[in-house]
Amino acid sequence: MAGVQISLILIFLFFFILTRIVWVRVIKEEILRVEIHLPLLAICLYQENKNNEKEKKETDKLSARAYIRIIAGTLSRTKNCELEIKQIALPCKIDSFGTMTLVKPFGYQGLIYSIIAYLKTKAKKLILCDNAIISSPDITKAQYYVTVKLRLFQLIHAALTFRRGLYEEKRARRIKYVGE
């Protein structure tokens, strides 16, 4: 009888944790940091800063279009998430004055705001903090600070979808190179 009660308590606890809202913070400054805040604990993942990185094979490198496809497929499966964009800082080069000097900032802003409009259609709620999107000549790489709030089972499903998308894109790229 005690075994049945313990197993029922564990099953209830499992489903309770599975349906709670978790926060996922993705912060990229010098290194990429992903924080997963669960109801009882937090998991922090850091990217190692390797100076002598191994050269990736040509078949392992993916284009920006491939990453956009993968992320769009992942976002389409997480409909009820809340997204908060605290900061997106993009590097901008200061060149000598020319015709592109006037056009580049508007092109970047148009691209960023179209991505935000797409995210608005996919998320239940989108919060864009004041002065969240900036262009700065002081930084060399893009920096961002984004928080996503969703249920744990949605997070697991999104992570599996992202992983599957990466695998399929790399597989398609390998087949393309073998076929040539």
Image: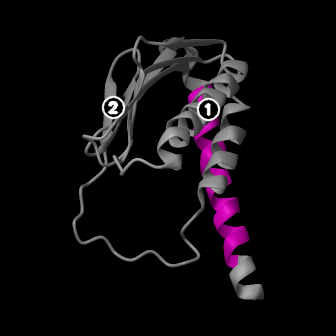
Instruction: Give percent across and percent down for residue 163.
Output: 60, 50
Q: Is residue 128 magenta?
A: no
Q: Nearer the viewer, residue 133 or 128?
A: 133
Dot 2 lies on which element?
A: strand
Q: Which residues are magenta?
A: 154-174
Residue 163 in view (yes/no): yes
Q: Which residue type does callout 1 highlight? A: Gly
Spatial separation of the CA atoms under disc 1 and disc 2: 35 Å
Dot 1 lies on which element?
A: helix
Question: In the displayed structure, does residue 172 sit left or right of residue 162?
Answer: right
Mark 1 vs mark 2: in front: 1
Q: Quadrant of residue 24?
A: top left
Instruction: Give percent across and percent down for residue 107.
Output: 59, 39
Residue 1 in view (yes/no): no
Q: 18 above or below 172? A: above
Q: Residue at x 57, y 32 (%)?
A: 112
Instruction: Give percent across and percent down for residue 133.
Output: 44, 25
The residue furthest front is 98
Q: Which residue type does callout 2 highlight? A: Ile
Q: Nearer the viewer, residue 97 or 81?
A: 97
Tell me which numbered mark, 1 or 2, is placed earlier along the sequence.
2
Q: Which residue is mark 1?
A: 110
Question: In the displayed structure, does residue 2 sit left or right of residue 110?
Answer: left
Marking on residue 43: 2
Q: 179 above or below 94? A: below
